[in-house]
Image (cartoon, grey):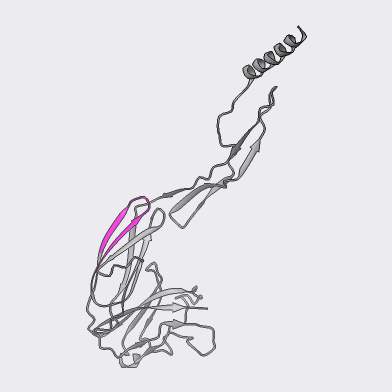
Amino acid sequence: MKKYFTYYIVFHCMVFFCSNAQSLDRQVINSNGGSGNAGANFKVDFNVGEPVIVTGTNANGIYTQGFLQPDTVFTSTGTFSINIFFGTESCTNAGDGFIYANPVNAIGPVTWSWLPTLDTTSTLTNIPAGTYILTASDTAGNTVNDTIVIPVSTIPCDLDFYNGLTPNNDGKNDVFYIGNIDKYPTNEFYVFNRYGIKVWEGMNYDNVNVVFVGKDSNGSDLPPATYFYILVIEGGQRKGWLELLR
């Protein structure tokens, strides 16, 4: 009789425990994280993905634990497009033309495809005159197609451009030097940043009195970067790029 009574109590407790057990649905326990801007046209919402443990208390000692799931969302505030900056060959048959493509309002990384070069980057350098076809796509499936024509240069190859500029007053590459510019005393010279914004200009460039030294039109130092120039002379113009280092 005593042995039977013990089994009954054990069985009764098991039934009681199961009837009072509680379950908790899976959920995000907290919302650590935030949001911020990535460039001028993008907003990124995120959380930190840290594990957290909480205790759900009840009469039967039920525990649960939660995990803060990573959550990154890229959104664009405008239409996906491409800004193109290109330069002709520096002189006839020089084979040093270039095309730079800069994405605007892209969602995520951009995939690049060029014809006829089969290149997969945003930049083409040392290319001859001709027609180039660009296809650019972002991770959201937005696609832009463009055709760029690099015209044949009619300028003879007697101007020399030195693309390095290190204005640190050591007497080496402190100015942007154009060889044989004295043969074209009437000229116009313009410098642009990668967004196509003009940052400096000079009339009758001569490497001495009118010369680009890595400052903008207000005399402030420009940041290290790749810049683009246009030299307008009688009979045509020369376009190219320069690297400003500090």
Residue closest to the far top: 1
Residue numbers of the magenta segment: 132-146
Indicate the quadrant containing the N terminus: top left, top right, bottom left or bottom right: top right
Residue 34 horizontal/vertical position (percent): 55, 47
The secondary structure that dominates the magenta segment is strand
Quarter of image, res 133: bottom left
Q: Is residue 132 left or right of residue 188?
A: left
Q: In the picture provided, is 201 more to the left or to the right than 168?
A: left
Residue at x 35%, y 59% (from the top left corner): 111
Q: Is residue 219 above or below residue 42?
A: below
Q: Residue at x 66, y 15 (%)?
A: 16
- The location of residue 200, given as percent across then percent down, is 41, 76
Q: Position of residue 124 (x, y in %)?
A: 33, 72
Residue 111 is covered by the magenta coloring: no
Name which quarter of the figure residue 156 lies in: bottom left
Name the one closer to the observer, 127 or 203.
127
In the depicted structure, whether residue 72 falls above or below residue 176: above
Near-viewer residue (43 or 61)? 61
The x and y percentages for residue 103 are 37, 60
Is residue 181 placed above or below 124 in the rendered structure?
Answer: below
* Residue depicted at x 40% and y 50%: 77
Does the magenta run of residues contain 136?
Answer: yes
Q: Residue 73, relative to residue 159: is it above or below?
A: above
Q: Residue furthest right?
A: 2
